Image (cartoon, rainbow, N blue to C red):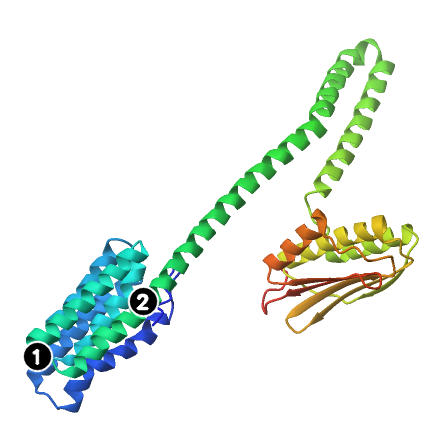
Amino acid sequence: MNLGISKKDPGWVPYIWLAYLIFFLWDPVMYHTGWREWIFTAVGLVAFLCFYFPFFKRRRPWNLICVGGIATLGMLYAPYNPGAACFFIYACSMAPFALETELAAAAFIAVLVGIATLEWWLLHVTNGFLFPATFLSTFIGAGNVYFAQRNRNIEKLRRANEEIEHLAKVAERERIARDLHDVLGHTLSLITLKSELAGKLIDRDPAQAKAEIRDVEQTARQALSEVRQAIGGYRSKGLTAEIREAKRTLETAGLKVDLQSTAIELPATQESVLALSLREAVTNVVRHARATRCILRLERSNSHCRLELADDGRGGHQIEGNGLRGMRERVEALGGQLRRETSQGTRLEITLPVPAGQEKV
């Protein structure tokens, strides 16, 4: 009984585990109890549901109150309905997600199982109560101790990744600000000075004023070009443009390129990763391969996209440098695979999953 509890909405999972309530309803159905017993059973069932569903939406201490309430129902109903053992199962399976540590969860399960055993012995509850209230409660609760700890570790990792992403964005913004300042700071200051000078000279020396205005125009055009070059480093040109650029770069380096590419609509993230990976792969071919021919393929098959770059160069280098290592990390972060073969030249194949309905807008 893995409750699948996490920070996100558990969805339909809580409804599945309501199947354990069959224990609680078994005796009233099978032994045709009277209306008083049915009212007593219905009150317990409603009380259970009032504790059960809020547990999935609340955090400490409210979820602990929910677990305690369900455990109390088990103690109260056990003498009258052996099916109340299911309440012990629920409480033991939910406790690991409500308590902070594995030790605290194990201690809670041990105490609750001890109470169930003592109640069975002192109140002479039927044997049908003992097995689920003790063995199943211990078995399921112990399993959920592991799942709860795993969920907590995943949550910690998620928060750490969010913090890293936030810091990376801050660092990138600062870098862009510095670069734009370097590109534009001096140029704009120069334009301001020349414009002021032209304004002062326009009556005294019109020819010199015109010359200053021409300098302002040339300086502004130069600044515009520098800004475009700077922005080009931050904005992806798209995979199609990157493929054309890759072919042009390889041909400029003297390689004969066999391009086999189909038009594919991809999510922005996948397209960016493939574009960056292709740029890095082409750079490696030009710098290190000593090749004469190169095959470049891009195709989509069902829910996967495959990019292949193969050359007839010297190959043989198995050690991954920083560029290839970064490429592999980006691909694997999206659930893809990067395969590299160097027995005959170098063949690089990247496969990325493309979920249905995730196409580029």
Residue, disc 1:
124
Q: Within 10 angstroms of label 1, few (less than 14), some, or many (20 or more) residues?
A: few
User: Residue at coordinates 48% horizontally, 44% vertically from top-left?
Assistant: 163
Measuring 38% from the left and 68% from the top, which residue is drawn there? 11
Residue 303 sits above or below residue 56 on the image = below
- Out of 141 and 59, give the one closest to the viewer: 141
| Numbered mark located on residue 67 in the image | none
Q: Position of residue 40 (x, y in %)?
A: 10, 77
Which quadrant of the view contains residue 241?
A: bottom right
- Please name the amino acid that badge 2 sits on: Ala
Closer to the N terminus: mark 1 or mark 2? 1
Binning the other alpha carbons within 10 Å of mark 2 as few (below 14), some (14 to 19) or many (20 upward) gives some
**Picture residue at 38% right of the left edge, 64% below the top:** 147
Answer with the quarter of the image where residue 243 lies: bottom right
Q: Is residue 16 left or right of residue 231?
A: left
Q: Percent position (x, y) of residue 18?
A: 28, 76
Q: Which residue is mark 2?
A: 142
Identify residue type, mark 1.
His
Q: Is residue 30 visible to the viewer in this orientation of the structure? A: yes
Tag 1 secondary structure: loop
Q: Quadrant of the N terminus?
A: bottom left
